[in-house]
């Protein structure tokens, strides 16, 4: 082995510089709080999904349409619970893994986008159904 390639324990190794933080302490606390709230809401979504799923299975024996609606609602809340929990985990990682928080923040934002995308389209569908219901009520009153 050449003398130039050897490593000496007496040589000073430069200290690794800590990664710059993107947020202030207060902002980290806000992100932590958001993650905590999202975790709780995600658990509640799972709870509703479970109850609706059980209701759907029980309804299979009496009313298929009711069972179908219950199972569809259970699936909806299950998906919302999954995305909410995933976003909560990403926000918690942002707080713990200072220095690599940008990627974790993007994961959390992607999960929030999914949640609000489905919420937006659900609201639009409900608005459309409400308008249709009002129109049908007016038309049936005129006939």
Image: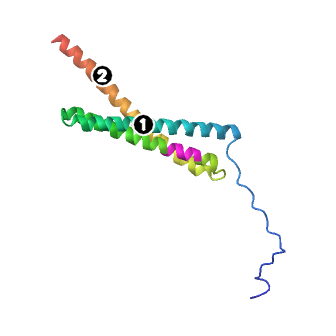
- For disc 1, the neighbor class at 10 Å (few under 14, some 14 to 19, many from 20) is many
Q: Relative to residue 6, is residue 94 depicted above or below? A: above
Residue 143: quadrant of the picture: top left
Write down the region rendered in magenta.
86-92
Q: Position of residue 105 (x, y in %)?
A: 57, 46
For the residue pair 111 and 68, the one nearer the viewer reads as 68
Instruction: For mark 2, give the secondary structure.
Output: helix
Residue placed most toward the observer, 21 or 31? 31
In this rendering, position of residue 21 left or right of residue 81: right
Residue at horizontal 63%, vertical 53%? 100
Separation of residues labelled 2 and 1 (CA atoms): 28 Å
Residue 9 position by quadrant? bottom right
Mark 1 lies on residue: 45
- Nearest to the observer: residue 110 or residue 10: 10
Note whether 8 is above or below 44 in the view shown. below
Q: Is residue 14 above or below residue 142?
A: below
Quarter where residue 77 is shown: top left
- Please state the horizontal and vertical placement of residue 62, each as a whole percent of the image: 18, 32
Residue under the point 74% across and 88% down: 1
């Amino acid at each position: 082995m050449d003398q130039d390639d050897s490593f000496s324990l007496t040589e000073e190794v430069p200290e690794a510089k800590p990664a710059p933080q993107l947020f202030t302490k207060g902002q980290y606390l806000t992100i932590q709080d958001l993650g905590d709230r999202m975790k709780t809401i995600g658990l509640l979504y799972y709870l509703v999904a479970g109850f609706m799923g059980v209701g759907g299975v029980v309804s299979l024996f009496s009313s298929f349409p009711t069972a179908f609606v219950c199972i569809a609602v259970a699936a909806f809340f299950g998906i919302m619970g999954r995305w909410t929990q995933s976003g909560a985990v990403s926000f918690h990682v942002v707080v713990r893994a200072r220095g690599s928080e940008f990627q974790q923040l993007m994961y959390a934002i992607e999960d929030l986008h999914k949640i609000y995308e489905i919420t937006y389209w659900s609201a639009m569908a409900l608005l459309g159904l409400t308008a249709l219901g009002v129109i049908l009520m007016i038309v049936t009153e005129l006939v």
